[in-house]
Amino acid sequence: MSSISNKAIVLAAFKHLTGERNTGVIDTYLHGSYIQHSPMVKDGKAGLLEALAYLKQQPAPAEAKSPVVRAIEDGDYVMLHMDVAFMGKNVAVVDLYRLEEGKLAEHWDATQEQPQNASITEGATAITDLHLTAGNKIIVEQYLREPDAALLSPGYRSHDMGYSVLENPRVHRIIGEGNFVMAQCSTADVVCYDIYRLHEGLLAEHWRVAQAIPAKLPHSNGMI
């Protein structure tokens, strides 16, 4: 059994495939039954290879700095929260992966353009309180099911410029690592990734990446 964490596998895959655009290692990181949910990429290994071929044609980033701002791992799931510069725009991205046998087996994402002169990815990044993971996930689920200001800390801050609580969201997955919890939710026309930082049993900080569900996807897997 590999001693490498799923988070480390995902970060390495991102570095080599997306950062270095090295398609020669795709079989090292991709499971044979890789399922794609991105609204921009076709299904399977062939779809990812096509997307990477397009990426190779784009100018390499001016800075070598990783765009990954936050990464959390919960069992077979790993989330990356990123600030990406692409084609003259800054965008906030959430990538969610499910791993199987130490390889990327399923992928979801959402992309939201960053506002000018502001950042919707800034804020705390340190993961703490690993022993509180399960309880923090319950608190976030409770808040999503029934929003209650009593669950917000006095200094609560949302980095989403137009933040509003979703009405009757469908909650698909909740993953957490210590003081950070991410909820994958949707309504009829939008997919949202809500990330919370908790402190002393209360929601202290919030980020969101939301993307409208397009009428047509390049695969039949849906965005969720």
Image (cartoon, rainbow, N blue to C red):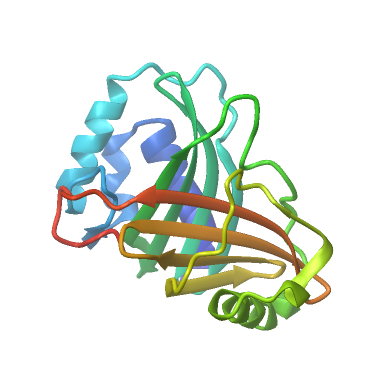
**Which residue sits at x=35%, y=31%?**
21
Is residue 62 at least partly visible in the picture? yes
Residue placed most toward the observer, 155 or 105: 155
- Left or right: where 104 falls relative to 72: left
Can residue 102 be seen at all in this image of the molecule?
A: no
Residue 60: give x, y in percent of width and height: 42, 19
Q: How many marks?
A: 0
With respect to residue 3, does 159 lie above or below?
A: above
**Res 37 → quadrant:** bottom left
Which residue does the image show at 48% across and 21% down from the upper left? Answer: 61
In the displayed structure, 15 sits above or below 89; it is: below
In what quadrant of the picture does the C terminus appear? bottom left
Q: Residue at x 18, y 50 (%)?
A: 215
Q: Residue at x 57, y 79 (%)?
A: 141
The foreground one among 131 and 138 is: 138
- Please state the horizontal and vertical placement of residue 157, each as a whole percent of the image: 74, 53
Q: Is residue 80 left or right of residue 31?
A: right
Q: Quadrant of residue 149?
A: bottom right
128 up-or-down from 132: above or below? above
User: From what the image shows, is residue 224 above or below residue 126?
Assistant: below
Q: Is residue 34 left or right of residue 8?
A: left
